Image (cartoon, rainbow, N blue to C red):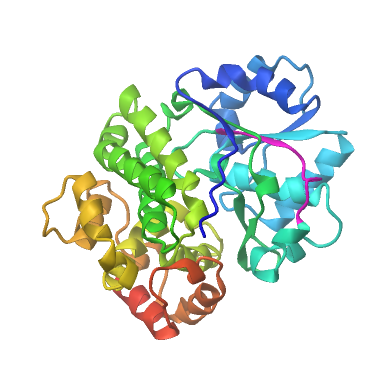
């Protein structure tokens, strides 16, 4: 039986940010904590949000790291309580929005954050007490603004997912104007993240035709516009289509994801060159070709002619090698095409495979992957 749930209020288009104050009033947020990162703040986007709010003194937490961590969640939750806040506004990429979701749990629920992780059976423990959240994305990739989940690195080094409909932002203000100044490299990496989301959720075996349609349309938009948005960041039409594709990929998340994400999550938790900073979207782009080759023979993929349907919306020939087309796009965008370029080597594989097998996305891949399968995919992606 399909379970289809779309309840987020979404403002999509130029000047969507202008709705921030009215959305706070609708949601009932009078004293927000604004979650962001220093780069977004330095770009002037936080001030633009504050100017729209006109709330007076709004506390700002701008210490979001490139990959949200439990330590920063707890620091922000402490700030939330100290400031007497009653809601959250996340202004930034997926890291800031995911961090805010972590705060929504930690500031309102007792005990250690770990107990609320999906693979720990924690989803039912996240209640309606979660702090209300309004999301303002400044990148077009993660789609976290319309997703019920968040990914965080815990203090023990694991990168785990937290999922609950209570974490779904009450409002998403998707304003492509906030992405016009995004650098080419980040535009490409986040854009490939959106493409990976649309592809992987479309391939997930759950029966959900509306989600399939949303994902396919998002893939078509992203594939047609990612190079334009990367080479000309001021292309307003391309930015709008990429913002929509990002949102659409995440709207289809309820079907599940698969091996791309069960690999990229533990890869993103690795300590490489002394820090955990491997970009999620770039990792998705790098491992996607190998996963596409692995999934090509899955029963549901073959029966529903899913690769042929993707080729059509991507404008590829009927006999095109889909995995190679994704690899070539990643190369044209100037992103790394192999894990070795990102500092990953075979000595890290055992840890990644262990994480992949335990990841919540492992169970919703169209074809069951073994430890040996994951090792082959990693080796192909090296």
Horizontally, is 10 left or right of 128 in the view? Answer: left
- Compared with 93, 337 (above or below) is below
Horizontally, is 213 left or right of 58 in the view? Answer: left
Q: Main secondary structure of the magenta part?
A: loop
Write down the quadrant of residue 276 in the picture: bottom right
Q: Is residue 134 magenta?
A: yes
Q: Is residue 23 magenta?
A: no
- Compared with 286, 348 (above or below) is below
The residue furthest bottom is 372
Q: Position of residue 274 (x, y in %)?
A: 55, 64
Magenta residues? 126-136
- Compared with 10, 15 (above or below) is above
Identify the residue at horizontal 43%, vertical 68% (top origin): 365
Q: Position of residue 74 (x, y in %)?
A: 78, 52
Horizontally, is 230 left or right of 320 in the view? Answer: right
* Observer-nearest of 285 and 300: 300
- Compared with 99, 290 (above or below) is below
Numbered disc total: 0
Identify the residue at horizontal 61%, vertical 36% (top origin): 38
Identify the residue at horizontal 73%, vertical 28% (top origin): 27
Q: Position of residue 187 (x, y in %)?
A: 38, 39
- Quadrant where the image shows the C terminus: bottom left
Q: Position of residue 33 (x, y in %)?
A: 75, 33
């Amino acid at each position: 039986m399909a379970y289809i749930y779309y309840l987020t209020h979404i403002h999509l288009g130029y000047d969507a940010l202008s709705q921030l104050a009215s959305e706070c009033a609708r949601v009932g947020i009078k004293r927000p904590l604004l979650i962001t990162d220093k780069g977004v703040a330095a770009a002037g986007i936080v001030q633009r949000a504050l100017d729209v709010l006109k709330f007076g003194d709004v506390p700002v937490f701008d210490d979001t790291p490139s990959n949200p961590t439990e330590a920063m969640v707890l620091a922000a939750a402490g700030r939330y309580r100290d400031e007497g806040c009653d809601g959250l506004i996340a202004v930034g990429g997926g890291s800031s929005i995911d961090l805010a979701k972590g705060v929504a749990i930690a500031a309102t629920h007792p005990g250690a954050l770990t107990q609320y992780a999906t693979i720990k059976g924690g989803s039912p423990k996240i209640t309606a007490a979660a702090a209300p959240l309004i999301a303002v994305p400044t990148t077009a990739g993660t789609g976290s603004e319309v997703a019920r989940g968040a990914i965080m690195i815990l203090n023990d080094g694991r990168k785990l997912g937290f999922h609950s409909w209570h974490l779904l932002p009450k409002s998403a203000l998707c304003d492509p104007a906030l992405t016009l100044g995004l650098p080419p490299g980040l535009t490409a990496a986040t854009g490939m993240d959106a493409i990976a989301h649309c592809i992987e959720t479309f391939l997930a075996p759950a029966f959900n035709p509306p989600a399939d349609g949303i994902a396919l349309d998002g893939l078509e938009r992203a594939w047609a516009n990612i190079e334009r948005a990367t080479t000309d960041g001021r292309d307003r039409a391309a930015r709008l289509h990429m913002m929509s594709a990002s949102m659409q990929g995440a709207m289809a998340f309820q079907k599940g994801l698969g091996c791309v994400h069960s690999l990229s999550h533990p890869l993103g938790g690795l300590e490489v060159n002394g820090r955990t900073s491997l970009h999620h979207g770039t990792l998705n782009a790098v491992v996607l070709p190998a996963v596409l080759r692995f999934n090509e023979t899955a029963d549901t993929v073959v029966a529903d002619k899913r690769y042929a349907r993707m080729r059509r919306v991507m404008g590829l020939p009927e006999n095109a090698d889909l995995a190679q087309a994704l690899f070539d796009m990643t190369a044209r965008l100037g992103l790394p095409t192999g894990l070795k370029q990102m500092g990953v080597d075979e000595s890290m594989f055992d840890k990644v495979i262990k994480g992949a097998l335990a990841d919540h996305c492992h169970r919703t891949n169209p074809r069951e992957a073994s430890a040996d399968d994951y090792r082959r995919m990693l080796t192909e992606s090296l």
